[in-house]
Image (spheres, rainbow, N blue to C red):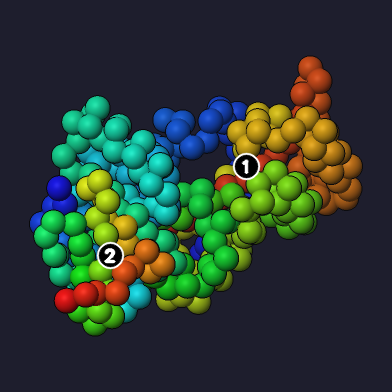
Amino acid sequence: MISEELLEILACPKCHTKIEYREPDKLRCPNCKVVYPIVDGIPVMLIEEAKPDEE
Amino acid sequence: MTEDVRARFGPVAANYAHAKFHSSPEGLREVVELARPQLGDLALDVATGTGHVALALAPHVRRVYGLDLTREMLDQARRVTAERDLMNVEWVIGDAVRLPFADETFDLYTVRAAPHHFLDVDHFLHEAYRVLRPGRHAVFVDCAPPMPARDVLHEVEKRRDPSHVMSRTVEEWVELLEHAGFVVDSAIPRELDWDFEDWMRTMAVPAPMVAELAEIVESAEGEARRQLRPERRDGRLWHAYWHALIRAERPG
């Protein structure tokens, strides 16, 4: 759904740390310990939409 | 640097072909020409809306990302991507002032008809600079009436569209960009022949307010009046309007 190349360049909008892909539909910032959702194939990279990471 | 830019100011031909700014083929061609995309480029179009500029860039670059705050806009953009069978366009929901990309990622950055909505222009430009690779270019196209016409239009714009924050003049744009670290290659003011009622219609402004706002334009005085040149043609109000077309480099 999301290209490898997009995963390569996506960063946390808050701290700019490279995000990590968590199957099937989450993008995790290891620094802020939050996840951004992928909704219907589009990453939602908004700080206010981030959820605390439960890992 | 500013001197070079100012040398480009001056009388400009009115564009009588103005119609639907956001999707007109002429407007899109103008942005693409200003962007000078290269086939190997990784491009970012910010506040892409329904993706007009991103889709126009797609055939000319390796890959383009369109970013917008609004899902409905991107869903529409995605439908067009599928219809045209474009494989090198991808969409991201995000904020121009908080870009979700690593530093020094893109070969080309574009934004059109959006910065006048941004509350924090300094941060928006800082982010544009941050994600661009050194030696690469950004293109900014936005409404940019000169002073004092800007002050007259400001009241009209705010009431027509409450999300309008402020238009910058070309001179203000250059100052802001230089402050953000950009080197401005060109900053071209483009004067347009503007159909007032058509402009109101795009925001579905109710008739009584259309009349009030027309009165503001038509009662402009002095230098603002000379700039705006309001006139009725077959009963319809027309006046001048302005865009800035700016190309700037993040120095290498």
Seen in the picture, residue B186 relative to B56 is either above or below; the reply is below
**Which quarter of the picture shows residue B105?**
bottom left
- The residue under label 1 is B191
Is residue B217 toward the left or the right of residue B122 in the image? right
Q: Nearer the viewer, residue A38 or B63?
A: A38
Kind of residue indicated by mark 1? Glu
Is residue B107 toward the left or the right of residue B219 in the image? left
Q: Residue at x 25, y 79 (%)?
A: A33
Q: Residue at x 34, y 55 (%)?
A: B93
Seen in the picture, residue B224 relative to B212 is either above or below; the reply is below
Q: Is residue B104 visible?
A: no
Q: Nearer the viewer, residue B38 or A21?
A: A21
Seen in the picture, residue B208 relative to B93 is either above or below; the reply is above
Give the mark toward the camera: 1 or 2.
2
Image coords of residue B25 (percent x, y):
42, 30
- The residue under label 2 is A36
Point out the image quarter for the C terminus of chain B.
bottom left
| Discs 1, 2: same chain | no
- What chain does mark 1 sit on? B
Q: Residues within 10 Å of mark 1 (few under 14, many from 20)?
A: many
Q: Residue at x 38, y 47 (%)?
A: B71
Q: Residue at x 61, y 66 (%)?
A: B172
Where disc 2 sits, the SS reads strand
Image coords of residue B234 (percent x, y):
79, 17
Toward the front, the furthest residue is A54
- What chain does mark 2 sit on? A
Where disc 1 sits, the SS reads strand
Q: Is residue B46 visible?
A: yes
Q: CA distance from mark 1 to mark 2?
A: 42 Å
Image coords of residue A49 (percent x, y):
37, 64
Kind of residue indicated by mark 2? Tyr
